[in-house]
Image (cartoon, rainbow, N blue to C red):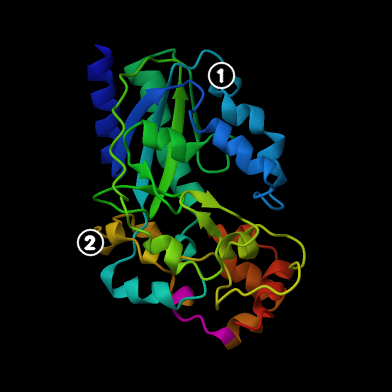
Amino acid sequence: MTPVELTQKLKQRAYDLGFELAGATPASPSSNYPSFLDWLNRGYAGEMGYLERRKEERGNPQLLLPGAKSIFCVALSYNPQPEHYPLLEKHPISCYAWGKDYHEVLGEKLKVLCDYLSKELAPGSKAKWYVDTGPILERSYAALAGLGWIGKNTLLLNKKFGSFLFLGEILTDVELPQDEPVENLCKTCTACLDACPVGALEEPGLLNANKCISYLTLEHRSEFPGKVELHGYLAGCDLCQTVCPYNANAPAGREESFQPRPEVLELTAQKTSQFSEKEFKEFTKNSALERIKYPMWKRNTRNPSF
């Protein structure tokens, strides 16, 4: 089997598993790594100390998998169904957390894909997968692998599927033909920058997490520094994606487990503010919201905007 044939089979398996996008790029340091270091040095990571602690690994895939030659990147859409799209502008929880925890969903699929590569397509080869939490610049490599381009809101954008995409990666010592990066189609559009109500996007492609509603509600562990405006959000924020023209006609995600749970659709301000710790843990069980601790949730509900 030639490298091209092997990659075609790997992509087809990815599509069969439900991934909308798949592509490969060399396992070499990302060209965006210097920008990432500059972002850290500005203090724009806020309390996300884990980014600083493992920054060397993010700059060199060989530290994650010695001998790695390729990074196989995939994307799975969580774009809401048309009937749920109006909720994006008023729901207090970002739609990434409406359904089952994406770490589990993508993890299960990537494990299957990893085994297919290392046991069937290239027996004896090494392969290691990551979803979000691994020390890898996933958006950078996804862009290098041709899955899309990095937009002005710092997210990966695809012409057909928009930006509501979960990303995953497989590092392997198998040499896979490189896919070509695609053109950046943001052009003169500034919709995402204009829509951010807190000015977190200080310039195209530069996000100051210390101002970002998603960061403050999901990652900032301590009490808020001074007066903070959350604009009615409790967990995450979809504003910079909702206004993106490439999301306007993007097809809805096909993954059933990302469909909103009934209790999410029935959520009210009064109900969330009155959650006991037990009720909160039950509400967030098996969802991406488990990363939020109960004191953070109570802190968020005390915000004047909610």
- Would residue 104 appear left or right of 222 to someone viewing this image? left
The structure residue drawn at horizontal position 24% and vertical position 58%, both measured from the top left corner, is: 251
Q: Position of residue 283 (x, y in %)?
A: 57, 70
Residue closest to the far bottom: 270
Splitting the image into 4 quarters, where does residue 4 fall? Answer: top left
Q: Is residue 42 magenta?
A: no
- Residues rendered magenta in the picture: 264-269
The residue to which callout 2 is attached is: 249
- Give the alpha-carbon distance from disc 1 to disc 2, as whole Å: 39 Å
Residue at 58 percent across and 42 percent down: it is 133
| Residue 267 located within the stretch drawn in magenta | yes
Q: Quick one: SS at disc 2?
A: loop
Q: Residue 265 location in percent, x, y?
A: 43, 77
Question: Relative to 7, is 238 above or below?
Answer: below
Question: Which is more toward the observer, 272 or 251?
Answer: 251
For residue 62, the mark is 1
Q: Is residue 21 above or below residue 116?
A: below
Q: Which mark is residue 299?
A: none
Report the amino acid beneath label 1: Gln
Q: Is 42 situated above or below 227?
A: above
Q: Residue at horizontal 46%, vertical 76%?
A: 91
